[in-house]
Amino acid sequence: MFLGEFQHTIDDKGRIIIPAKFREALGTDFIVTRGLDNCLFVYPREEWTQLEEKIKTLPSMAANARAFSRLLFSGASECELDKQGRVNVPNHLREYAKLDKDCTVIGVSSRVEIWDKAAWEEYSRQSSESFNEIAEKLVDFDFNF
């Protein structure tokens, strides 16, 4: 399980440090792809395979399913950690997430997310203001907090 929030910078070559506590769970190679809300999703191989299987069950005749599948898979890249615990984020993904220098790396249960620091701060601020409302809407999912 991935938990926590970490501040890092992305260098001129597009490399960012993956927090040490995430590295073992990610493994030596993993998938980085477009995420929702203009961040990047980072999946261990096993989680990626499970997600792939779920997406295969979406109806291919549905335009939204095709669009989602296309964007997720076409943006995906197989990545590896270097000896310093960094990943080289492909240019098209850096552009998508608007990663320039200061970044926030967060753990979100089964995946890691990489955000532009300012974008994460704004998203976090807005979501925090409506945290109670969001939780109330999730009652339909039968969560017990």
Image (cartoon, rainbow, N blue to C red):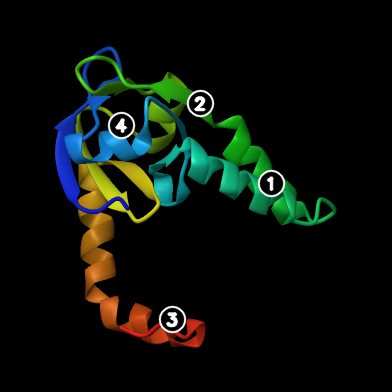
Mark 3 element type: helix
* Of pointers 4 and 3, the one earlier in the residue sequence: 4
Q: Give residue 99's mark.
A: 4
Q: CA distance from mark 4 to mark 1?
A: 24 Å
> Dot 1, crowdedness within 10 Å: few (<14), some or many (≥20)?
few
* Of pointers 1 and 2, the one earlier in the residue sequence: 1
Q: CA distance from mark 1 to mark 3?
A: 26 Å
Which of pointers 1 and 3 indicates the residue nearer the eye? 3
Find disc 1 in the rendering and name its residue: 67
Q: CA distance from mark 4 to mark 2?
A: 16 Å
* Of pointers 1 and 3, the one earlier in the residue sequence: 1
Image coordinates for residue 6, horizontal then vertical, percent: 16, 43
* Residue 29 occupies quadrant: top left
Find disc 2 in the rendering and name its residue: 77
Figure check: 136 above or below 49: below
Q: Residue at x 47, y 86 (%)?
A: 142
Mark 4 element type: loop
**What amino acid is at disc 2?**
Ser
Image coordinates for residue 124, horizontal then vertical, percent: 24, 60
> Dot 2, crowdedness within 10 Å: few (<14), some or many (≥20)?
some
**What amino acid is at disc 3?**
Leu
Q: Residue at x 24, y 53 (%)?
A: 3
* Of pointers 4 and 2, the one earlier in the residue sequence: 2
Which of pointers 4 and 3 indicates the residue nearer the eye? 3
Q: CA distance from mark 2 to mark 3?
A: 32 Å
Find disc 3 in the rendering and name its residue: 138
